[in-house]
C-alpha cells in the first residue's frame, strides 16, 4: 500500500472569511479503481493533525474499505502540513498572515477534487472520525444529492461550547511557549508541545480508562510511562502553526454557518438526504453522545438515521482504535454492516 500522494490545485480561491487563498491545494491519495458507473466511491477525510497514512489501517483486503470493491479517496484537511497549510504556503502567505479556512471551504474544494478532477458521479459513503466526522457532516449538508451514506464517528454537526473550551485549554498550553510571538510560532515550541500533550491526555481518554489502568493494555508499565510515551511527544510530529490553523477550523465548525442556512442548525440538518450513522464514543469527553442525540431528530429528511454509540472506556480514541482489538473489531463490523445496507 502506497503512502504517496498527489496535489489538486484549486487555484486562487475565495474563502468564506472573505480572503483569497492563492493556489489552494489539496493533497490526496486514492486506493482501488473507479468503476464504470463512477459510483463505488468512499471519501475518507483526515482528522486533527492526521495525514493520509494514519488512516490506512481501515483500507486493504478484508478491511472495511477494500480496494477490490471500493475506490477510496483520502483528502488531507487544510492545515495538516500536506494540503495548503501555514508551514507550506507560498511566500505570499506567511504563517502570521494565514487566513481562516473553514470546513465549508474544505468541503467545497474537496467537492471540486471529486467531481471536476476525479470524475466521480456518486459517493457511496463519506466516513470520518473526529474532525473527519465533522467534515462528513458538512459533506452531507452541502452536497446532499451526491451521496448514499454518511458515517460520523466521534464527531458532531457543530463544535459545542464545551468542546470549544477544551480546545482553548490545548491552545493555551501550546501558545504559552516562548516560541509563540506576534500570533505565530517562530521556532518549534518544545515545552508547548509537551504541555498540550498533557492537557490532551486528560480529555482524549476517559475517567474509566485511567481508573481501570487500561494504559497497561497498550504496553505501559505505569501511568507516567503512558503520559511520556503516548502524549509528551504526540504533537511534535506536526508544525505548531499548522496545529493552530486546524484548531481554528475545529472551534468554528458549524454546518449551519453556510450562507444558505443563516446559522440555523435545524435547517442545515434538514438538508441531509443520505443514510446517516452517528457513532459517538460512550465515554468521549468532548464529542459527547448527547451532541448526536440532539442532532438525530433534526435529520428529518435523511433516508435513515441511526445513533449507535461505541461501547468503550477508551474515550475519544475509541473511534480510531487501530491498536485496540476489541474496539477495532466492533467498529469494523459496524462499518461493513453500514456499507452493505441497500442505498
Image: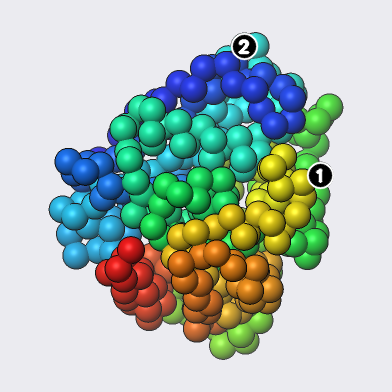
Q: Quadrant of residue 38?
A: top left
Q: Quadrant of the C terminus?
A: bottom left
In the image, taking residue 61 as reference, residue 186 lies left or right, namely right
Image: 180 above or below 23: below
- The residue mark sitting in front, 1 or 2, is 2
The answer, for residue 252, to whether it is visible in the render is no
C-alpha span from label 1 to label 2: 27 Å
**Residue at x-position 50% and y-position 72%:** 305
Residue 64 locus on image (x, y percent) = 28, 64
Label 1 neighbour load within 10 Å: few <14, some 14-19, many 20+: some
Q: Position of residue 307 (x, y in %)?
A: 53, 77
Compared with 111, 197 (above or below) is: below
Residue that extends furthest to the bottom in the rendered view of this protein: 212
Q: Earlier in the sequence, mark 1 or mark 2?
A: 2
Query: Which residue in the protein does label 2 denote?
Result: 91
> SS class of the residue under badge 2?
loop
Identify which residue, 160 or 115, lies in the foreground. 115
Q: What numbered label is drawn on residue 201? A: none
Residue named by callout 1: 176
Query: How many discs mark residues in the rendered view?
Result: 2
Between residue 221 and residue 1, name the one nearer to us. Answer: 1
Amino acid at each position: 500500500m502506497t503512502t504517496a500522494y498527489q496535489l489538486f490545485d484549486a487555484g486562487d480561491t475565495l474563502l468564506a472569511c472573505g480572503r483569497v487563498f492563492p493556489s489552494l491545494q489539496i493533497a490526496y491519495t486514492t486506493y482501488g479503481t473507479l468503476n464504470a458507473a463512477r459510483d463505488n466511491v468512499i471519501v475518507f477525510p483526515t482528522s486533527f493533525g492526521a495525514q493520509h497514512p494514519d488512516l490506512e489501517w481501515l483500507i486493504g483486503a478484508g478491511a472495511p474499505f477494500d480496494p477490490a470493491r471500493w475506490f477510496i479517496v483520502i483528502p488531507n484537511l487544510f492545515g495538516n502540513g500536506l494540503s495548503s497549510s501555514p508551514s507550506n504556503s507560498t511566500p505570499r502567505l506567511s504563517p502570521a498572515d494565514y487566513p481562516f479556512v473553514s470546513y465549508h471551504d474544505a468541503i467545497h474544494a474537496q467537492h471540486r477534487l471529486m467531481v471536476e478532477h476525479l470524475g466521480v458521479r456518486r459517493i457511496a459513503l463519506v466516513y470520518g472520525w473526529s474532525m473527519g466526522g465533522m467534515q462528513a457532516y458538512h459533506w452531507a449538508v452541502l452536497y446532499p444529492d451526491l451521496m448514499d451514506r454518511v458515517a460520523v464517528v466521534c464527531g458532531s454537526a457543530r463544535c459545542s461550547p464545551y468542546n470549544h473550551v477544551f480546545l482553548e485549554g490545548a491552545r493555551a498550553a501550546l501558545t504559552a511557549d516562548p516560541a509563540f510571538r506576534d500570533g505565530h510560532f517562530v521556532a518549534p515550541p518544545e515545552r508547548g508541545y509537551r504541555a498540550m500533550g498533557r492537557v490532551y491526555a486528560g480529555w482524549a481518554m476517559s475517567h474509566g480508562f485511567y481508573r481501570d489502568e487500561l494504559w497497561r493494555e497498550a504496553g505501559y508499565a505505569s501511568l507516567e510511562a503512558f503520559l511520556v510515551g503516548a502524549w509528551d511527544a504526540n504533537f511534535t510530529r506536526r508544525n505548531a502553526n499548522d496545529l493552530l490553523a486546524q484548531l481554528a477550523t475545529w472551534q468554528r465548525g458549524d454546518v449551519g454557518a453556510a450562507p444558505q442556512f443563516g446559522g440555523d442548525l435545524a435547517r442545515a440538518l434538514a438538508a441531509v438526504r443520505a443514510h446517516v450513522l452517528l457513532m459517538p464514543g460512550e465515554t468521549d469527553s468532548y464529542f459527547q453522545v448527547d451532541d448526536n442525540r440532539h442532532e438525530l431528530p433534526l435529520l428529518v429528511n435523511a433516508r435513515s438515521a441511526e445513533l449507535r454509540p461505541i461501547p468503550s472506556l477508551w474515550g475519544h480514541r475509541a473511534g480510531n482504535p487501530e491498536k485496540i482489538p476489541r474496539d477495532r473489531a466492533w467498529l469494523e463490523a459496524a462499518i461493513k454492516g453500514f456499507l452493505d445496507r441497500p442505498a
